[in-house]
Image (cartoon, rainbow, N blue to C red):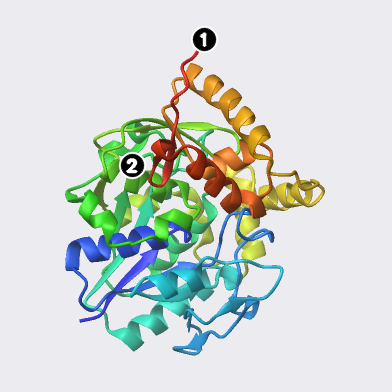
């Protein structure tokens, strides 16, 4: 009774896939999650996604598909959250390798479907940017979603497209695509979040972190990413909706353009043509800046003073919550210091930790 969930954008989509699987089907026979190893620069200092040759200890499932077990390790200096996810969750995490374009991802899917004969195939995206046209000014990271959407449209099998947490990625306002949302599949609850154990205490995903916080009842405005995008936390935030797969690919210009791509470079070129940029270019430029940034001492008094100034400004913007990724970058610390910063803040002010978000308490002047 194997189920397959394709985590459309990797990262937090893989965590949300595990949460959805447990919520809908319980702990028995957990699903196989097909996902990218494409973490933010806070975790992986190398831009772009990792392929199988960036790991040791992978397990070959088919000629094109590798599974990431708990014992796997990314080759330095690369980083990845997948081995730790495999250690802490009962699901099997198979690796999407997009370096051969949609042709390669389709081949991986076809081999996995033949190997597993799954009873269901879900394509899950947190936030809804998989429904982007490609020209939206707020769109930041369309490539991963477009690659998986295109590949899922090419396989000869029924794929159910699911969007969780409409708008939580901060890339598309929910009003832009709400008419496309079909039936309600599930509304996450605090009990569903508990199935993830302590994963959200360390995993850096902002969208899935907000999804979990909203499931626990958090409401307000959460500021995310390095640029401080404001994301509303509403009663719609913990919901999961089905979307017609054909409608999605008809709307997504980038996915249609990627259908026959054979390399990641080719896919990037299409992204530059259609969207005006490649998110991997952004990561390349940011990685170069971060590499040149000297480490800053995490002095508790300095950190708390910086936090007070940030919170006062954020409260003035109407912000009620933020993420530790946002705090790390807003306070000008490096990705390697994120966990230490998180521990310092939680130990200093535990009442403001609304797992996995930080609650803003300062009052604007």
Q: Which of marks 1 and 2 is in front?
A: 1
Quadrant housing the N terminus:
bottom left
**Earlier sequence position, callout 1 versus callout 2:** 2
According to the image, label 2 marks what residue?
166
Q: On the picture, is 264 further left or further right than 132?
A: right
Q: On the picture, is 302 further left or further right than 319?
A: right
Q: In which quarter of the image is residue 19?
A: bottom left
Residue 145 point in image, percent of width and height: 46, 56
Numbered badge on residue 365:
1
Q: On the picture, is 191 further left or further right than 230?
A: left
Residue 303 point in image, percent of width and height: 64, 35
Please say whether residue 165 is visible from this viewpoint. Answer: no
Please say whether residue 78 is visible from this viewpoint. Answer: yes
* Category of crowding for the residue at label 2, using alpha-carbon neighbours closer than 10 angstroms: few (below 14), some (14–19), many (at least 20): many
**Vertical side of 283 occupied by 90: above or below:** below
Work out how far the residue at label 1 is from the one at label 2, CA to CA, in angstroms.
Answer: 33 Å
The residue depicted at 57 percent of the width and 25 percent of the height is 308
Residue 156 point in image, percent of width and height: 32, 75
Nearer to me, 335 or 352: 352
């Amino acid at each position: 009774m194997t189920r397959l969930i394709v985590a459309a954008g990797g990262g937090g989509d893989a965590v949300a896939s595990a949460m959805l699987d447990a919520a809908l089907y319980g702990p028995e026979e957990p699903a196989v999650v097909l996902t990218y190893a494409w973490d933010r620069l806070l975790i992986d200092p190398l831009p772009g996604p990792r392929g199988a040759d960036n790991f040791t200890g992978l397990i070959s499932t088919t000629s094109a598909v590798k599974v990431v077990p708990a014992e796997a390790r990314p080759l330095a200096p690369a980083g990845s959250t997948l081995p730790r996810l495999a250690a802490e969750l009962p699901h099997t995490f198979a690796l999407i390798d997009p370096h051969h374009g949609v042709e390669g991802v389709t081949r991986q899917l076809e081999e996995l479907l033949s190997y597993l004969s799954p009873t269901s195939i879900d394509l899950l995206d947190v936030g809804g940017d998989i429904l982007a046209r490609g020209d939206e000014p707020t769109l930041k990271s369309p490539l991963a979603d477009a690659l998986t959407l295109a590949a899922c449209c090419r396989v000869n099998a029924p794929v159910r497209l699911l969007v969780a947490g409409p708008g939580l990625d901060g890339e598309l306002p929910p009003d832009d695509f709400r008419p496309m949302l079909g039936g309600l599949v599930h509304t996450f609850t605090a009990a569903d979040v508990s199935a993830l154990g302590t994963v959200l205490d360390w995993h850096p995903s902002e969208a899935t972190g907000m999804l979990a916080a909203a499931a626990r009842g958090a409401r307000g405005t959460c500021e995310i990413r390095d640029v401080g995008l404001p994301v509303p936390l509403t009663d719609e935030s913990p919901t999961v909706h089905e979307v017609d797969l054909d409608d999605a690919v008809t709307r997504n210009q980038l996915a249609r353009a990627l259908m026959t791509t054979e390399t990641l470079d080719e896919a990037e070129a299409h992204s530059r043509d259609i969207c005006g940029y490649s998110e991997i270019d952004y990561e390349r430029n940011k990685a170069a800046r971060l590499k040149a940034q000297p480490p800053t001492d995490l002095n508790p008094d300095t950190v708390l003073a910086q936090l007070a100034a940030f919170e006062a400004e954020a409260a003035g913007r109407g912000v009620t919550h933020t993420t530790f990724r946002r705090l790390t970058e807003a306070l000008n610390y490096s990705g390697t210091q994120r966990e230490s910063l998180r521990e310092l803040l939680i130990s200093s002010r535990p009442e403001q930790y609304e797992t996995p978000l930080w609650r803003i308490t300062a009052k604007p002047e």
